Image (cartoon, grey):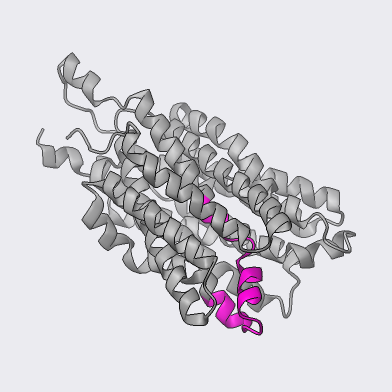
Amino acid sequence: MSAHALRMPRSGFGRGQVYAVAGCYFVASFAALGLPPYLTEILPELGDRDARWAGVLYVVPTVFGALGAPLWGRLADPFGRKRLLLRAQLGLAVSFLLAGWADSLATFTVALVLQGILGGTFAASNGYLGAALEGPALSKALTLMQGSARAALVAAPILVGSLSGWMSPHRQYALLAVLPLTAALLLAALPGPVQAQQPRREPETMSAEVPSVGSLKGLFALEFAFVFSTVISFPYLIELVHDRLPGTSPALTGVLFALPHLCYLVAALAVHAAFRSRPRAGLVLGFTCIALGLAGHGIADSQTALIAVRLLLGAGLTLGLVCLSVLAAAGAEGRAPGELFGSLEFFSKAGAVAAGVTAAAGSARYGPAAPVLIGGAAAAVTAALLPTLHLRTRWSH
């Protein structure tokens, strides 16, 4: 079998199916990404008048998603990636329905716990793609999946805000449950990924191609550090903008929040083409841009300066996400994809939880600039240590 053939999608799994999986993740993510910012409006309807539990409930799905991701990933390999992807979409639909019809804080909390445990659509989607694709095709598909996540992160709050005029964000959970249900129906029509029979290789060749435990530990560490250093800037960005530029319109604040994610949507595929053969260099550059961009947030005192540092952060975000996708694709070769992507999701969500807790503590103690400075320091340390990590950066074929 030629090297070119080995890089081709398995079982006739083509570009249309990849776009379908990414599109289904996009529509299923609306409630999960668009409604948490409105918890301060939802909780008073459930008896928490001052929304004191908003900060805790914001991370509840993430915490339980992190705990459940490795288990679902391991189950996907023996029981079928398509089945576990459908389970994740249907699990979201059930949890959203329960959240939308909850009439007490306790019931709503249970719904968020179930969202974390039963969801995991991102890891399930990546595991499904990892069983059908390999090499550059897989890394490009993972890059597209991250684009789907960024697009949902930009569009979902806008949609929820637009609907709020005639339906409360609380009840929108029930309405938006139709989206993961629709995604499940669409995914049911897709073929199940079946690995093609691989050609026999000499034992020494096979052992050289299996990713080492050390390389996966390095990948997991980078995933945690990347999510921590970027997500830590999210919760208090609006407060920071208002502190530096009093009177800034909500529209401009929203644009500033979205800029890094828009950078990814514009540049991700070009960055993938440029760095797919040198992801380590791309990550060093990415973490450096993140460090400089977040440090710039701490001193930016004008609209132009804020736009500039947000774009610099966007460059780092794009480089980091793309190059981590390349490393994940390389690490998936020779391994069960469900287990790998489930474990990767655990470290991603663990980084997000750590970022949220650190941001809250830092902001309360030192003000709204503290989270971006902490995140910048973490990114700078990671960039300095990255050359020492053992990583698998190339495909074997």
Boundaries of the magenta span: 229-255
> Magenta stretch containing residue 239, yes or no?
yes
- Residue 93 visible within the image: yes
Q: Is residue 393 above or below residue 71?
A: below
- In percent of width and height, residue 136 lies at 24, 46
> Magenta stretch containing residue 193, yes or no?
no
Q: Main secondary structure of the magenta part?
A: helix
Is 132 or 158 nearer to us in this picture? 158
Is 287 or 124 nearer to us in this picture? 287
The residue shown at (43%, 50%) is: 380
- In percent of width and height, residue 64 lies at 65, 40
User: Residue at the top extreme?
Assistant: 203
Is 291 or 215 nearer to us in this picture? 291
Quarter of the image where the N terminus is located: top left
Q: Is residue 244 above or below residue 270?
A: below
- Residue 23 visible within the image: no
User: Residue at the left extreme?
Assistant: 2
The residue shown at (58%, 54%) is: 232
The residue shown at (27%, 40%) is: 134
Q: Is residue 201 above or below residue 172?
A: above
Q: How many marks?
A: 0
- In percent of width and height, residue 234 lies at 58, 61
Rendered image quadrant of residue 156: bottom right
The residue shown at (73%, 68%) is: 169
Is 393 or 34 nearer to us in this picture? 393
Quarter of the image where the C terminus is located: top left
Left or right, 276 with reference to 225: left
Left or right, 365 with reference to 325: right
- In percent of width and height, residue 270 lies at 26, 62
